[in-house]
């Protein structure tokens, strides 16, 4: 039996504005033991995105479940595409019935069909899907979709923008789906282009059964511990809504790796390397261990390139107050 836990939590930025949670998530267990799971993140700038995200999850799950139950040998990728099409159409129909602009109903959608080993998926938006394979490696099954690195690609962008595929050549012990706030914490910018880009001690806390020892008896307690963690002071850097959904195989187990793989990254060294790449002119003729004042030439930089200054300000803040996510250990 595939076990799962999932929750959508209202972000602190939404609470301050008096806005409810705009995320949605859910699962359907099929008669054959497989699980269909989906998450959606209503776009924050859209008035009715909370409705859209719930419709997207409910419709896509039901379309997949109905198709597989009716024809167990159906083409799963076509089923997922149809699920996305029907979710988009239902949101369109609902907005018309309410006489609301469709543009106020934008949402992302990520969905998986999981048989306890192999996974088939559909994705659009800035969240993501991660798998822990039997070798103990964390695999990016999808990557976030953002136009120009900023604007989220919603379900309404159409099937030309949807990513639909399978991982039939690789078995997974667990699958994680997360909306952007949490997903981005698993892949911090300082680990980009490193040999291991995922923040292993953090993501392991959510999806490594070697650590969790999931069972029917403890699954609810484990879920609540993760909810409490996401609501704690350790996660104050995440102000957006937070959704995590994790599926655990009952037949595939991931291999444990050496202790080094699970060790906390050397954040100070990583930050220094990033600074040197971003501001090479500030490190010229400097001692290797000497940290320059990144903001010594702030006024001159303001005159030369305003965009760079905005980035430098972010670096300064990150050096003063390091993200509390970084020091989480599984």
Image: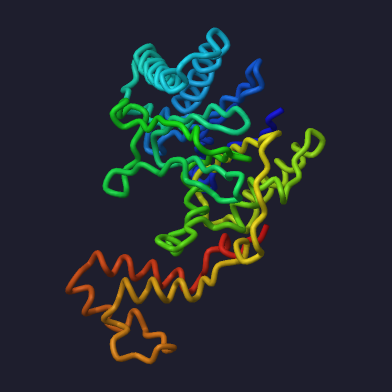
Residue 262 vs 267, above or below: the answer is: above
Residue plotted at (41% across, 85% down): 291
Residue plotted at (66% across, 48% down): 208
Seen in the image, is 183 located left or right of residue 205?
A: left
Residue placed furthest toward the top? 70
In front of the other: 125 or 310: 125
When asked about the image quadrant of residue 132, the answer is top right
Residue placed furthest toward the left? 304
Seen in the image, is 64 located left or right of residue 292?
A: right
Seen in the image, is 133 located left or right of residue 80?
A: right
Residue 97 vs 60, above or below: the answer is: above
When asked about the image quadrant of residue 52, the answer is top left
Residue placed furthest toward the right? 217
In front of the other: 24 or 202: 202
Is any part of residue 22 visible from this angle?
A: no
Residue plotted at (43% across, 41% down): 142
Q: Quadrant of the C terminus?
A: bottom right
Is any part of residue 262 visible from this angle?
A: yes
Return the x and y of residue 57 as percentages of the image width and height: 51, 25
In front of the other: 115 or 29: 115
Return the x and y of residue 287 as percentages of the image width and height: 38, 92
Q: Quadrant of the N terminus?
A: top right
Residue placed furthest toward the front? 169
Residue plotted at (46% across, 71% down): 270
Return the x and y of residue 329 as percentages of the image width and height: 66, 61
Residue 7 vs 89, above or below: the answer is: below
């Amino acid at each position: 039996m595939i076990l799962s836990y999932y929750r959508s939590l209202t972000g602190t930025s939404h609470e301050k504005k008096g806005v409810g949670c705009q995320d949605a998530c859910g699962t359907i267990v099929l008669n054959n033991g497989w699980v269909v799971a989906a998450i959606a993140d209503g776009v924050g700038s859209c008035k009715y995105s909370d409705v859209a995200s719930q419709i997207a999850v409910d419709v896509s799950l039901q379309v997949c479940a109905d198709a597989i139950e009716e024809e167990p040998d159906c083409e799963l990728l076509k089923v997922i595409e149809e699920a996305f099409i029907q979710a988009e159409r239902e949101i369109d129909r609902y907005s018309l019935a309410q006489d609301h602009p469709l543009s106020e109903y934008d949402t992302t959608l990520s969905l998986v069909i999981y048989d306890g080993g192999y996974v088939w998926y559909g994705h659009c938006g800035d969240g993501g899907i991660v798998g822990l394979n039997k070798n103990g490696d964390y695999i990016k099954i999808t990557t976030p979709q953002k136009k120009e690195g900023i604007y989220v690609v919603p379900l309404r962008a159409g099937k030309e923008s949807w990513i639909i595929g399978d991982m039939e050549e690789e078995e997974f012990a667990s699958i994680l789906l997360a909306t952007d706030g949490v997903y981005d914490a698993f892949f911090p910018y300082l680990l980009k282009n490193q040999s291991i880009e995922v923040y292993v001690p953090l993501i392991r806390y959510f999806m490594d059964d070697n650590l969790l020892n999931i069972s029917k008896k403890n699954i609810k307690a484990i879920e609540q511990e993760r909810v409490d963690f996401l609501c704690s002071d350790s996660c104050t850097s995440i102000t957006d809504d937070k959704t995590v959904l994790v599926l655990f195989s009952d037949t595939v187990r991931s291999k444990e790796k050496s202790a080094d793989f699970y060790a906390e990254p050397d954040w100070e060294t990583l930050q220094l390397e990033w600074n040197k790449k971003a501001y090479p002119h500030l490190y010229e003729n400097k001692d290797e261990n000497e940290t320059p004042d990144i903001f010594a030439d702030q006024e001159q930089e303001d005159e030369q390139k305003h965009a760079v200054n905005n980035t430098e300000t972010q670096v300064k803040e990150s050096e003063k107050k390091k993200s509390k996510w970084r020091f989480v250990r599984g």
